[in-house]
Image (cartoon, rainbow, N blue to C red):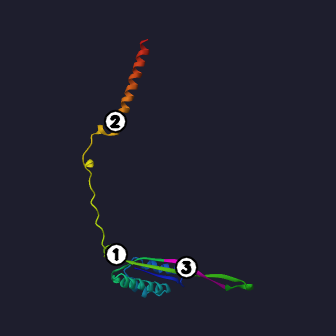
Amino acid sequence: MHAYLHSARLAPKKANLMAKMIRGMPVPDAIELLRKTHKKSARFIEGVIQSAAANAGHNFKQDAQTMIVKTIVVNQGTAYRRGVPMARGRVRPIRKFMCHISVTLGFNDERKPTSPKKPKKPTKIRSSQTTSTPVKDSPVAVKKSGKSSDSSDSSVSSDSSISSVSSK
């Protein structure tokens, strides 16, 4: 449930102040808050939210009164280039900014839209996971035992060489 307003003659900084106020609020509360706010940006955002609520009712057959303002994004649009006269015939440039406002309505986390979801598949437990294997059969244990036997052989050979040297 989306609605967009492109190239609104409003500075994005000023529109973003109102957007922060109503982000995450229920739609009726957001519209009521915007009606009581005396700002130009409130009028623009109120119209976009009402358009998104109408889209939700007409296009998606959803009740807009139970929805919340899921996201509201204010982006900078193009800027008018104007000028103010200065001394000696010069002109000081002024940029008048425009903005794009995008509103997405959604449901609270408690209530999801009525779309069928696939059930999760149960995980199967393999028979090899449930039975324990002896340590001797594992390749790591064989490797360790092989290492220790090599070291014991080298110690035996070094002991025999020491004994043969000392006997001479």
Q: Residue furthest right?
A: 88
SS at badge 1: loop
Q: Nearer the viewer, mark 1 or mark 3?
A: 3
Percent x, y of residue 78: 57, 80
CB atoms at circles 1 and 3 under 8 Å apart? no
Please name the residue that numbered disc 2 is placed on.
142
Percent x, y of residue 158: 42, 22
Question: Splitting the image into 4 quarters, where does residue 69 fall?
Answer: bottom left
Q: Nearer the viewer, mark 2 or mark 3?
A: 2
Return the residue nearer the eye: 133 or 102. 133
Return the residue nearer the eye: 39 or 103. 103
Please name the residue that numbered disc 3 is placed on.
77
Our reading of the magenta stretch's main secondary structure is strand
| Residue at 29% over, 37% down | 136
Is residue 33 in the magenta section? no
10 Å neighbourhood of mark 1: few (<14), some, or many (≥20)? some
Q: Which mark is residue 108?
A: 1
Q: Which residues, given as a range, are shown in magenta?
A: 74-83
Is residue 80 in the magenta section? yes
Q: CA distance from mark 2 to mark 3?
A: 69 Å
| Residue at 34% over, 36% down | 142
10 Å neighbourhood of mark 2: few (<14), some, or many (≥20)? few
| Residue at 47% over, 85% down | 44
